[in-house]
Image (cartoon, helix red, strand yellow):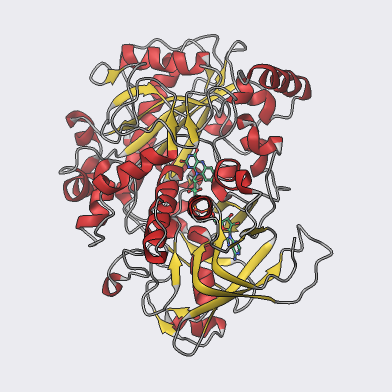
Amino acid sequence: MSPTPGLSTNICVGGTAAGVLVGRLAATAPSLRILLLESGPPTQDNPLHKQPSQFIKHLAPSTSTVRFHVTQQSDAVGGRPLILPTGQCLGGGSSINFMMYTRASRSDFDDWETEYGNTGWGSNDLIPLLKKTETYQAGPVGSTHGTTGPLKVSYGGLYTNVGKDFLKVAKEYDTARQTSEDADVNDMDTVNVYGRWQKWIDRDTGTRSDVPHHFLYPQASNKNLTVITAARVRRVVLDGENRATGVEFTWNRTILPDADHDVQQVKATRLVIVSAGTFGSPGILERSGIGRADVLERIGVKQLVDLPGVGEHYQDHNLLFVPYAAAEEAETLDGIAQGNEEFTTQASEEWAKTGKGIMAHSSLDAGMKMRPLPDELEGLGEQFRTRWDSYFAAKPDKPVLWTGILSMCGLPLSTVPPGKYFSMGYFNAYPAALGFLHATDANDPAAPVDIQTGFLQDMADVRSLMWGYKHTRELARRMPLFRGEPAAFHPPFSKDSAARLYEVTDGPIRSEHAIAYTEEDDRVLEAYTRALVMTSGHGLGTCSMRPREQGGVVDSSLNVYNVHGLKIADLSICPSNVGANTYSTALVVGEKAAVIVAVELGIAGV
Ligand SMILES: Cc1cc2nc3c(=O)[nH]c(=O)nc-3n(C[C@H](O)[C@H](O)[C@H](O)COP(=O)(O)OP(=O)(O)OC[C@H]3O[C@@H](n4cnc5c(N)ncnc54)[C@H](O)[C@@H]3O)c2cc1C
């Protein structure tokens, strides 16, 4: 590693989207000089990044591959601060995420184009780029899937009995909706169909489909591509005419303890592209003097460019995982998550020989993008109804909730007694309430970020999550593998209520009817929802691609307003939410950025 890099044509900062962008440009124009700076460690050939089931290890408190941001306390989430993890390694989120393959609804991208004026970002433009990234191995290749891309999409190395049980019960219980093992729940149109869930896992090798192993490491012999890890970018340097001329960075001394404290400088002759993610990119702008006057004044940075939208419009998906006790024969990842060495070694051996088994799995086998049916809409109440009428009713491809089942306990390991679990998961696909995040220090990229998520500040978001609990509970209790609702993980419903918990059972509860919840039960459930809601890790929107007067930070060519030679390319540019886990959207932002940059630099063939 060169400690003091010199001149470069382009400098890029960051993970998922950056990796795609840099990989595409470097492969197509190998004479282009590119420098990629990343604050975390490299990941090459590390089993923790290649073996899908190891994803949970990245969330351990001792991790060096994930950064945990702590939000402001909020009464809307029970007076707690929330902990927001984000990838911090080469590849960013792509190298540590849960590998769920979930794609935006078609109308999400169309909204970007029609509601925010971003020509070229509608679904007709982005679907070809989504196809370009992937090789679809999970069944018949529908018209929105690709067959030649570097990242493989499959069902993983095992179809667990937990996933099968879930779909069987869904078919028997929720007869108003469809259930099909052959359905493609990620064709970008389908909602209200229970089906198997695809994963960013290679069917043949059983490895994670991350960005660096497929876009960056294969280019190790490209002398014009320099990748420097453990480099924390402090700011972009602007000249007197607000042209980006380079960046300053310091070494991440948690990873390089012997590195010096000096500020490193690197110059760019053409372009600086910031792809430090939703949590990283706004802070880099603010430390560079680009942002809201009051924020810059607070941290003591001279304002060079007035851009009030920097750090605003934070969006995410508010999520709950609700664990249920599972029968001994349930095929789950708990052995790996709970550190059972014998189980992990056996799973690793099978994976090494065949690329199959629980090690080639990321816990989620089945789920649905869910919209309420007429009677359910009625039950969701007036506060949700207003949101439905204004946002969902006219867009039938938008789910209200994502719901699905994990073959493991989905809560932090420290709180979980050993045993077998499955968990019901559900998140608001388009929460109504938004938040913000801003830098708190003029110089230090590792300083805490000032974050307010907005979680559950709108009652519509609470009502839909309460529906998620009730709906998924009906399925969980009917599953043959169900063995109880541990009190530690469920709302403390009164023992006299029809909603009371069955803490330990020797099989499913076969009631004919759904539980009737009283007003008091709903109060208990609301408090539980507020106390346990967490992030999905899907933050986006903090350097939004909108008109400047609507709080925009970049235009539709990803240029930062009123700055020359500076682009942003990561999920922070999303002008509005996508109803899906966000890896797929980060990849398409990277692909689109590569096309935009190639056109501007006159590179053919990207
Ligand atoms: C725990 C977790 C689980 C997830 N699971 C799924 C899933 O199953 N499916 C799915 O679709 N999505 C999932 N996601 C979301 C998805 O992975 C991310 O949304 C996506 O990877 C973000 O891409 P990005 O390019 O915007 O940013 P990132 O990939 O986060 O890249 C930003 C990079 O910039 C670096 N950086 C930040 N600041 C600086 C700085 N000052 N200097 C240098 N480098 C800097 C960071 O270290 C990071 O590597 C998950 C996310 C998390 C956190």
| Residue at screen point 31% across, 34% down | 144
Is residue 454 in view from this perspective?
no
Residue 233 appears in which quarter of the rendering?
bottom right
Give the quarter of the figure containing the N terminus: bottom right
x then y, percent, for residue 154: 47, 25
Q: Is residue 396 above or below residue 345?
A: below
Residue 177 appears in which quarter of the rendering?
top left
x then y, percent, for residue 475: 39, 20
- Report whether 45 appears left or right of 158: right
x then y, percent, for residue 128: 32, 42
Total marks in image:
0
Which residue is nearer to you in this view: 285 or 413?
285
- Report whether 581 appears left or right of 55: left
Q: Is residue 516 above or below residue 305?
A: above
x then y, percent, for residue 280: 54, 63
Is residue 67 in view from this perspective?
yes
Residue 120 appears in which quarter of the rendering?
bottom left
Q: Is residue 577 above or below residue 168?
A: below
Which residue is nearer to you in this view: 506 or 90?
90
Q: Is residue 403 above or below residue 85?
A: above
